[in-house]
Image (cartoon, rainbow, N blue to C red):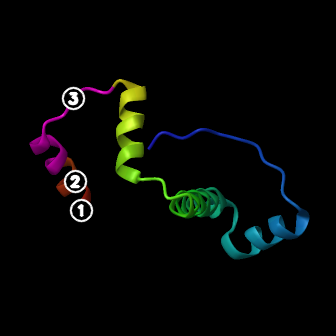
């Protein structure tokens, strides 16, 4: 997975809770997962169609066109 390093500021009490519950090595993973869940829930609240969003992102990134078979293979690969 590609990552981007960033610096954030947190209130001391939140930082202390993160350190006591997760430790240094797992804070990034926790924040990443929590952020992703929050973004998804906000999109659901805003009734954003995830398929439509994916197709728009694909257009923006100018990705190569995939056949239905290739898409299905990629989905199945992710499920195993």
Label 3 neighbour load within 10 Å: few <14, some 14-19, many 20+: few
Task: Give the distance between the C-alpha atoms of the residues marked 3 and 1, in whole angstroms.
Answer: 22 Å
Q: Secondary structure at mark 3?
A: loop
Q: Secondary structure at mark 1?
A: helix
| Left or right placement of residue 36 versus residue 51 in this view | right
Q: Nearer the viewer, residue 20 or 76?
A: 76
| Left or right placement of residue 56 versus residue 73 in this view | right
Q: Position of residue 15 (x, y in %)?
A: 81, 64
Q: Position of residue 70 (x, y in %)?
A: 14, 41
| Left or right placement of residue 38 versus residue 61 in this view | right
2 or 3: tag closer to the N-terminus: 3
Q: Secondary structure at mark 2?
A: helix
Label 2 neighbour load within 10 Å: few <14, some 14-19, many 20+: few
Q: Is residue 1 magenta?
A: no
Q: Are marks 2 and 1 in contact (CB under 8 Å)?
A: yes
Give the residue drawn at x 69%, y 61%: 24
Q: Quadrant of residue 4?
A: top right
Residue linked to disc 2: 75
For marks 3 and 1, give the one nearer the viewer: 3
Task: Give the distance between the C-alpha atoms of the residues marked 2 and 1, in whole angstroms.
Answer: 7 Å
Task: Give the distance between the C-alpha atoms of the residues marked 2 and 3, in whole angstroms.
Answer: 16 Å
Give the residue drawn at x 48%, y 53%: 48
Note whether 12 is above or below 77 in the view shown: below
Q: Which residues are the magenta region? A: 63-73
Q: Which mark is residue 79?
A: 1
3 or 1: tag closer to the N-terminus: 3
Q: Position of residue 21 (x, y in %)?
A: 70, 76
Give the residue drawn at x 14%, y 49%: 73
Q: Position of residue 34 (x, y in %)?
A: 60, 64
Q: Which mark is residue 65?
A: 3
Q: Are marks 2 and 3 in contact (CB under 8 Å)?
A: no
């Amino acid at each position: 997975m590609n990552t981007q390093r960033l610096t954030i500021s947190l209130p001391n009490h939140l930082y202390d809770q993160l350190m006591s519950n997760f430790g240094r090595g797992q804070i990034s993973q926790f924040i990443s997962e929590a952020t992703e869940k929050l973004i998804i829930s906000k999109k659901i609240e805003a009734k954003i169609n995830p398929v439509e969003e994916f197709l728009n992102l694909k257009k923006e990134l100018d990705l190569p066109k995939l056949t239905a078979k290739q898409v299905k293979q990629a989905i199945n690969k992710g499920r195993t």
